């Protein structure tokens, strides 16, 4: 009897303490949660009328022009473009491509650096229903060719800076019409390419509005490339609806107005710079400062020059800016808000202290995915949170996964298992075609789309988007990014698919045992690439390898390290033990194999011992 009385007292005590804990958590988070719910509802009720009335990006841009034709849309290299000028240029594009027989639904690839014409070109194509594929300007040879072919592009528009890149694949572009847009004086010309800037002079600034009538918010507006988790870049579908949702979401989250001036140094071919940020300008009327290429030393100079009040970032750009202004006095700028992702905790704290404490809206999302979140409260290290009150119905969930295969772990009934607090898990998002926030539009390639969908997750018939990323969630429902899974790592703000790099290394060196993986470097966001090669006969020519990689890969995808393995570490089932290699990294005190580091000036891999201390201490620029 006494035993059961003690059990009863213990149970009651435990229950009260547990309930007190939840009451305390709710008390601490209700304001945060309510704010996010209000923002979500505001965005939702903003988008629904657009979808019902089929208000596409093109139609919303037209309204922006009608409202403020003479307002500056873009500042670029000491020149200003008004909304009317952007509209006129885009109309010329539309009229020209109509005149040469292009039709609604066809795709045109665009390879051009950041500039107002980049935006006006795809706007003009969009006005006549043509889909534009925004090509990463770092891509070369096979990667570039693949991005053009997977969307079945009928044409390629490219800038003068990319003449060599196009020339290198010219013979493989049979049937694809080429249009060169000259941005520099006396440029080289690609054979059979049409001079786009010259032919546009003969076309009208006015475009027949009847082409807008048949467009739907469900139509694809753009293709934006993402590496996903394996293989070559994939073309993610950006519908009008998704473009509007992304832009309106960040507008409401940051509490911006059309009087804000937004600084955008990120690439316009990516979703952060070219969809979320650009949408603030095109459909919400903000003035935007566009920079051809990011510059750490000019970041604050530009913001001060143009009186910018908001900006974007990726973790690496913040680190670069911090390094470029080390030891300098606090700058007198007007930037109060910045949004982005990949900001490490230590850089975050230093950045706030150095630059007048701008509000950092650290978030998480993918170009194609339906898992999106934002850190409203400036909780350092967190990428967002799930409101406590929405736990039972939240579409964002962490599930247990196998650390070797990265596949979800399922219970005896075949369903996935939710993670507990502070337990690493795979982030997934429930797919619901009826809601803009929960749709998964997928890729141009349906097979690749299917690979990202998990079925029968918690009940038969349900579908979830597999983000391919690992997170933890604390008791306050803040989420923290841990790592990518599979054969992809992130370096300099870009995703690198190891299988693509491995294929190129094999082409350069011939039949060798090769593995590519990402390793962590102190004080750097993401992971740098490392090539592991079994080279017992010492036949690998590092110079040939480095030069081959440079000619085939963008700079960020060239592995920083080379490790000459004595043997490939394998499991009992003959799978390469990448986890073991990743843990060992480039630590010369642990690794017995020879390790080399990429020297971009010499275009060669040199012994790491020469720079090891500077690398470990963060003194080496990468």
Image (spheres, rainbow, N blue to C red):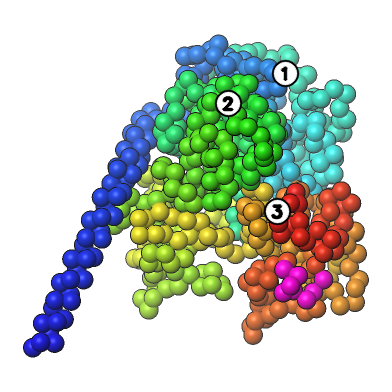
- The residue depicted at 73 percent of the width and 66 percent of the height is 586
Ranked by sequence position, the earlier of labels 3 and 2 is 2
From the image, which quarter does the N terminus lie in?
bottom left
Q: Which residue is mark 2?
A: 332
- The residue depicted at 52 percent of the width and 16 percent of the height is 65
Range shown magenta: 587-594
Residue 502, visible in the rendered structure = no
- Residue 167 location (% of width, % of height): 85, 40
Q: Quick check: is 590 in the magenta stretch? A: yes
Secondary element at image label 2? loop
- The residue depicted at 13 percent of the width and 87 percent of the height is 3
Q: Which residue is mark 3?
A: 618
Secondary element at image label 3? loop
Query: Residue farthest to the left?
Result: 1
Few, some or many residues within 10 Å of mark 1 (<14, 14–19, 20+): some
Secondary element at image label 1? helix
């Amino acid at each position: 009897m006494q035993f059961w009385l003690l059990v009863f007292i213990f149970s009651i005590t435990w229950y009260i303490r547990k309930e007190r804990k939840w009451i305390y958590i709710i008390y601490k988070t209700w304001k945060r949660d309510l704010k996010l719910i209000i923002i979500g509802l505001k965005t939702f009720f903003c988008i629904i009328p657009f979808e019902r009335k089929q208000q596409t990006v093109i139609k919303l841009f037209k309204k922006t022009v009608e409202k403020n034709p003479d307002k500056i849309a873009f500042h670029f290299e000491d020149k200003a473009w008004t909304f009317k000028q952007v509209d006129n240029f885009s109309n010329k594009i539309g009229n020209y491509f109509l005149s040469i027989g292009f039709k609604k639904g066809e795709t045109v690839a665009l390879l051009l650096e950041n500039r107002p014409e980049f935006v006006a070109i795809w706007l003009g194509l969009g006005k006549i229903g043509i889909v534009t594929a925004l090509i990463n300007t770092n891509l070369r040879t096979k990667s570039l060719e693949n991005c053009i072919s997977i969307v079945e592009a009928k044409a390629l528009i490219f800038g003068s800076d990319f003449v060599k890149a196009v020339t290198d694949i010219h013979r493989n572009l049979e049937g694809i019409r080429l249009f060169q847009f000259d941005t520099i004086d006396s440029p080289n010309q690609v054979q059979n390419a049409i001079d786009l800037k010259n032919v546009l002079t003969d076309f009208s600034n006015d475009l027949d509005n009847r082409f807008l009538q048949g467009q739907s918010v469900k139509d694809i507006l753009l293709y934006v490339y993402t590496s996903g988790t394996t293989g070559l870049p994939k073309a993610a579908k950006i519908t009008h609806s998704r473009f509007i949702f992304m832009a309106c979401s960040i507008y409401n989250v940051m509490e911006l107005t059309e009087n804000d001036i937004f600084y955008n140094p990120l690439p316009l071919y990516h979703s952060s710079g070219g969809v979320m940020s650009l949408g603030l300008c095109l459909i919400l009327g903000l003035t935007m400062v566009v920079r051809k290429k990011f510059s750490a030393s000019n970041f604050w100079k530009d913001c001060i020059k143009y009186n910018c009040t908001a900006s974007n970032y990726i973790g690496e750009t913040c680190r670069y800016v911090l390094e470029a202004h080390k030891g300098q006095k606090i700058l007198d700028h007007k930037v109060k808000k910045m949004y982005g992702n990949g900001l490490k905790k230590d850089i975050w704290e230093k950045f706030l202290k150095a630059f007048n404490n701008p509000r950092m809206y650290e978030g998480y999302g993918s170009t194609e995915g339906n898992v999106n979140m934002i850190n409203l409260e400036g909780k350092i290290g967190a990428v967002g949170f799930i409101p406590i009150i929405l736990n039972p119905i939240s579409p964002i969930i962490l599930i247990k996964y196998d650390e070797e295969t990265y596949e979800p772990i399922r219970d005896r009934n075949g369903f996935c298992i939710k993670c507990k607090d502070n337990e690493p898990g795979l982030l997934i998002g429930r797919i619901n075609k009826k809601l803009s926030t929960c749709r998964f539009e997928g890729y141009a390639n349906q097979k690749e789309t299917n690979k990202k969908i998990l079925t029968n997750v918690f009940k038969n018939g349900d579908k979830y988007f597999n983000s391919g990323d690992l997170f933890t969630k604390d008791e306050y429902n803040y989420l923290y990014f841990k790592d990518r899974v599979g054969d992809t790592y992130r370096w300099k703000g870009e995703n690198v698919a190891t299988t693509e790099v491995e294929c190129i290394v094999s082409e350069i060196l011939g039949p060798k045992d090769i593995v590519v993986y990402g390793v962590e470097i102190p004080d750097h966001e993401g992971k740098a690439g490392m090539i592991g090669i079994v080279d017992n006969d010492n036949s690998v020519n590092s110079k040939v390898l480095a030069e081959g990689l440079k000619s085939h890969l963008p700079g960020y995808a060239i592995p920083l390290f080379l490790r000459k393995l004595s043997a490939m570490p394998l499991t009992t089932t003959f799978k390469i033990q990448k986890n073991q290699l990743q843990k060992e990294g480039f630590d010369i005190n642990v690794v017995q194999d020879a390790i080399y580091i990429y020297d971009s000036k010499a275009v060669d891999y040199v012994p790491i011992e020469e720079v090891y201390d500077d690398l470990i201490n963060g003194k080496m620029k990468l």
